[in-house]
Amino acid sequence: MKLRQAMRILGPGRKDGRNLTFEEAEAAFRAVLSGQESEIQIAAFLVMMRAKGITVQELTAFARAAREAARIPCAGMQGLVSICGPSDGIEHHPPLEVAAGFIAAGAGVPVLIFTDRCVSPRRGLTAASVLEGLNLPLHWDPAKAERDVEQHSFAAIALPAMLPPLMSLRRVRAEVSVRTPLSTVEKLLAPAESSVVLGAMGGPVLGSAAEVIQALGHPRGIVVQGPEGGVIPALSKRTRGVELAERFLVPIHIEPEDFGLMSEVECELPLFSLPPEEMGAGDNPELVRRCAEITLEILEGVPGPARNSALLGAALMLKASGRALTLAEGVDAAAHSLDSWAAREVLLRIAQRS
């Protein structure tokens, strides 16, 4: 199917316009990835889908098409947790999923983080920024990422390494300047057998995102609306989420106060001198360096909001994996991973390997 045909079906402003069927949506996203459609057609289609509002069926079909074209590591690996935050990053908080991932790995859960660097429209800070600041690998070879998960229970992989057409679509994303369904599809490239922890933006998308990971066949998972759409819960207020367990979707509310982790302030980044207006926080080397420092402070046991946030994030990973039956049990296991230096040992092993 050509994108022109898909846009005729959507029919903006026409009485006979409708949503795409699963087959039509799958074919349309194959066309987006094919390299045979113009950037103008792709941009028009993505913006039209955003304006219409994408359905669960359409998004599931997009994800299926993307997975068919991708080289996804760790397929079939038992107990794996896939971490999928916003690929365009966050601006005001350090991405703590790397610290949380080391903590979860130290507690015995294999962790694979899917990330990217300085992607439009936000060009914010991501797990890739933290790894760069720590001088740790962001893998561009799926086989090497799988090897690190097998040997060290932790790895991070660049999204375009799995799905190269994403690189060629960056200019489209920059020109469109708003989030489109492409930003969501990137979060859905995890192996179907893995449990997932997925960050969702504020608003009504929470339930839809959970329905999509259910439709894609994941056995377990948690979709959470952390600050700026990240995977780490807030400390100063309740964080909403939806858990997929035993094929059922259950709303959850994460209350830091229940675990003695509540703080009046979040772990926020200082306002360093910002780069030129056309760039984002992810381009700022001072912010990247500070994110790495915060991650090291967490793993060295420095108390404070950053440590508390990472413990909550790791607890989500442990619960999503099934290793912890409750968030309280997850927080206890995460704290033991930190206090026993098991989390730091994971980092040291990967650094030595690098």
Image (cartoon, helix red, strand yellow):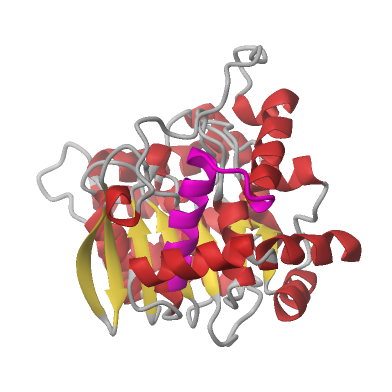
> Residue farthest to the left?
15
Residue 160: percent from left, percent from top:
67, 55
- State left or right for residue 84 relative to residue 123: left
Residue 68: percent from left, percent from top:
55, 74
Q: In which quarter of the image is residue 235?
A: top left
Judged by its main secondary structure, the magenta piece is helix
Could one spot residue 20 in this view of the protein?
Answer: no
The quadrant in which the N terminus is found is bottom left
Query: Along the line of sight, which residue is nearer the eye, 235 or 242?
Result: 235
The residue that appears at 78% across and 45% down in the rendered structure is 134
The residue that appears at 61% across and 61% down in the rendered structure is 339
The residue that appears at 37% across and 43% down in the rendered structure is 234
Q: In this view, does 82 lie above or below 173?
A: below
Asked if residue 308 lies in the magenta stretch, the reply is: yes
Residue 261: percent from left, percent from top:
38, 48
- State left or right for residue 292 relative to residue 22: right
Query: Along the line of sight, which residue is nearer the eye, 118 or 310?
Result: 310
Q: Is residue 43 above or below residue 187?
A: above
Q: Quadrant of residue 293?
A: top right
- State left or right for residue 289 relative to residue 98: right
Could one spot residue 259 in this view of the protein?
Answer: yes
Task: Give the residues drawn in magenta, as a range.
Answer: 299-318
Q: Is residue 45 above or below residue 64?
A: above
Asked if residue 323 lies in the magenta stretch, the reply is: no
Residue 54: percent from left, percent from top:
28, 52
- State left or right for residue 246 relative to residue 302: left
The quadrant in which the C terminus is found is bottom right
Query: Along the line of sight, which residue is nearer the eye, 114 or 43?
Result: 114
The residue that appears at 77% across and 79% down in the rendered structure is 151
